[in-house]
Image (spheres, grey):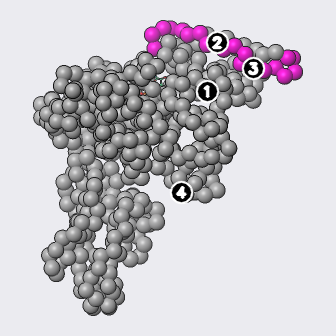
Amino acid sequence: MSKNKTVGIDLGTTNSAVAYHDERSLHLVESTSGHVLMPSVVAVDKGGKFTVGHHALRKLKRDFDPEFVFSNIKKQIGMPAQEGEDYTTAYGPQIVAVNGERHFIGPNKQTYSPTELSAEILKSLKASADRKLKKPSSGVVITVPAAFDNNRILDTKEAGLMAGFKRVIIKTEPEMAALAFGLHKTPFTRFGVFDLGGGTFDIAHGTAAKGDINIEPPIGEELGGTDFDKAVWRYLAAAYQQDEGKDLDSQPIAKLKLMPTIEEAKRELTDLDNAFVRAQGIYIDYEGGGTRDLQYTITREKFDELTKHLVDKTIELTKRLLERDDKTPRDFDEILLVGGMTRVPAVRKAIEDFFGKARIRDDVNPDYAVVMGAAIAAAQEDDILPRTFNFSQSVAFSFGLEDEHGNFAVALPVGAAPGEIAELVVTTAQDGQASIPIGILQGDAGSKAKDCVRLTRYEHRVQPGPAEKPRISVEFMVDNSGQLTVTGRDQQTNQSFPIREP
Ligand code: AMP
């Protein structure tokens, strides 16, 4: 019987995957439809029944029913929402604010939270893993972008619990990629993680030394493969308008039919000099009757020209990160390529040109790097693999307290090292006050408390007495996995008490 209790899941914007590492080797788990990568797509029918992954995507392609097929769920999870605002994206189901969260609208006006939709994806991956393990898994390592704030992490954790996992461990994508590339076994290296996926771009850098992996707060943006696909769509729609006099934008079915074909053509252009884009019945001709088709050939040169601004943007963001941390491209030994879009020749060339002498690592499949790392971390949790490393990602947000004026008093600033302890002192403002409110916040320095994320609200009881007599030290510390612990200490009695635990 396998010792595995914990599996690793990459919960991605476009695709997700599950893997585990047993005593012998790493296993990428295939779903019943035979794929390791499962589209992060959830469809819901009028009876409220969910369909996930390839089946949901096929539904979208076959039935052309975009309304109740939810994709890009990760972009919405844990994001703030204001009542009355509409968060619907250019294409797909409506997204509205419900209790400060963004919910998707399904059949019969029923709303679905990104957390419960993510739970459906995780449930499906768990079922595949459990089938392969021949027993139920109880724990999971789920990866999130390093830039996810606490709310987004908590909602992802909640989705894991809803999916039936008893123990949910959140790790960041660049950390897990570093594991997949084996950096925890390297004596010393200075590395970058260039992660260009379907929906997001993240650039991170750090050092690894004898099992200690240290990653600085990364920079990321919503920029990915779908933006490249859209650039091609715009070009083809303009050509169609010119050649056929028909406006494809006016018919939603055109986009639905063409986008998957464009995506396939993009993949082809990775290996070939030109690709054929063809879609039948793309335009319903209400005046002339019948439907019209589309056929174009697109060259790699044209594709590179149409998408150059996107590739340039990734390099611009990379430059920005290096400038922020006072680094130059020469300060790197290796660059880890993560995300399917790093296969695109123009992307790869831009990375090579920018980093010059650094070794470009493409020896791990870029689609699987994150899930492979998560599987290794999961096996370390189960003591199947030795825990040979410590992670330390410097603090990506500032942590502190709400002061009496409603301002954010920073204790641990961005970039603070894991294990570093910072202290703020709170006291009573009035004579006879019986308690001190302690509000723990996460946010940007200089913000008002109301604009920060409130992590904990704590009321500490004190012996009533003169104002400013009771003095409480509030100590902040972030551990190696980015989790915050806050402890209070009464300066009179020297007694400590927990305010927030990871
Ligand atoms: P990920 O989010 O890492 O799964 O990345 C998926 C993105 O990578 C999608 O936009 C894919 O179209 C793109 N992709 C995957 N393989 C290739 C390839 N061989 N050539 C070009 N793009 C690819």
* 483, above or below 266, in the image: below
Q: Secondary structure at mark 4?
A: loop
Left or right of residue 54, residue 66 in this image? right
- The residue under the point 72% across, 16% down is 281
Q: Disc 4 versus disc 1: distance between alpha carbons?
A: 29 Å
Q: Are marks 3 and 4 in contact (CB under 8 Å)?
A: no
Question: Which quadrant would residue 230 be assigned to in this image?
Answer: top right
Q: Disc 4 versus disc 2: distance between alpha carbons?
A: 43 Å
Left or right of residue 167, residue 198 in this image? right
Camera-side residue: 243 or 20?
A: 20
Spot the residue most to the right: 287
Foreground: disc 2 or disc 1 = 1
Task: Give the labeled residue for mark 1.
Answer: 60
Question: Which quadrant would residue 422 be assigned to in this image?
Answer: bottom left
Task: State which quarter of the image contains the N terminus.
Answer: top left
Task: Give the labeled residue for mark 4.
Answer: 100
- The residue under the point 31% across, 54% down is 414
Q: Residues within 10 Å of mark 4 (few under 14, many from 20)?
A: few
Q: Secondary structure at mark 1?
A: helix
Task: Give the labeled residue for mark 2.
Answer: 278
Task: Give the labeled residue for mark 3.
Answer: 283
Q: Is mark 3 within 8 Å of ligand 1?
A: no
Q: Disc 3 versus disc 4: distance between alpha carbons?
A: 39 Å
Q: Amino acid at mark 1?
A: Leu
